[in-house]
Amino acid sequence: MAIQTGAIKYRGSFKSIRNYMNLHDTNTYAGEKGGANKDLIMNNAAFVRTRENMNEFNGCGTVAKAIRRGFLNLLPDQTDKRFTPRLLKLIKMINLNDVEGTRGKRSVIISASRPILMKIVFNELQNVAEMIQDEFTFSHIALRTEATLKVTDFKLKPILVPEGAGYFRLQNHLSVISDYSYSETTRCYEPVDAFNGKSTFIYSEYTPIDTPLTVELKAAFPEGSLVGNEVSILECAGLEFYQKVGKAYLPLKGSSMMMIDVF
């Protein structure tokens, strides 16, 4: 695939060449017009592999949407524009790990590939949380319905504090993602466990930037929640900065979130 590198801008196509751009991508791509139409792709035997790939990609998109739903209160403030493509890439890696499934209908068995989701990066441009990860101590109970994040005498280095920030808060965030399998009934990917896409979180108090913080943040799902073996819990730790105006705390840019455990 050709990529336009010059400064020439135009709209439309030149004879057999078309050009286009992808969302959140500054490159302009060029390719030949024509090729197979939708009817051929969906029905012709020559495109069986294409249909298989499309079906699994749609399934990975369904899983990514569920993970994003669990991260709903983090979006879009804690993520960059490339977060979803990076997430889809990781989910596809998990999808490919299903070596026993039928191609085109392979499951997304997250519970068997949890370390892969530890690679989730929320924002490549803001990584303050990663710089302070050694300050975090975290644990969860055997039932996996609650997890605790601890810091002791935690104090921010001035270089990590954005201009204008007077206060900060830490956040302990939990979200749920089920394994997914292809349903012959609905002809789409469905969660194996109904306890899917849920989330819970807890914040520390607003703390002055120059004040050491010792706190234990316990995030827990509602009492009576059951976490099955085909469900995974994503635990994230976040750092948010604020400026106090009157009695209000206004959030500032420079906050960040990182994945600290998947269990």
Image (cartoon, helix red, strand yellow):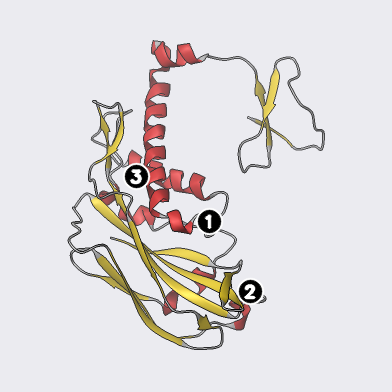
The residue identified by callout 2 is 162
Residue at mark 1 to residue at mark 3: CA–CA distance = 22 Å
Residue 212 place in picture, x, y as percent: 48, 88
Q: From the viewer's side, name the closer residue of 156 and 200.
A: 200
Q: Secondary structure beneath disc 2? A: loop
Q: Residue at x 25, y 33 (%)?
A: 101
> Considering only order in the chain, which callout, 2 or 1, is on the residue closer to the N terminus?
1
> Considering only order in the chain, which callout, 3 or 1, is on the residue closer to the N terminus?
1
- From this viewpoint, which residue is outermost toward the right? 8
Q: Quadrant of the C terminus?
A: bottom left
Residue 35 place in picture, x, y as percent: 57, 15
> Considering only order in the chain, which callout, 2 or 3, is on the residue closer to the N terminus?
3
Foreground tag (3 vs 2): 2
Residue at mark 1 to residue at mark 2: CA–CA distance = 17 Å
- The amino acid type, in three-letter code, at marker 2 is Pro
Mark drawn on residue 94: 3
Q: Secondary structure beneath disc 1? A: loop
Residue 56 place in picture, x, y as percent: 37, 32
- The amino acid type, in three-letter code, at marker 1 is Thr
Residue at mark 3 to residue at mark 2: CA–CA distance = 37 Å
The residue identified by callout 1 is 79
Q: Residue at x 70, y 15 (%)?
A: 16
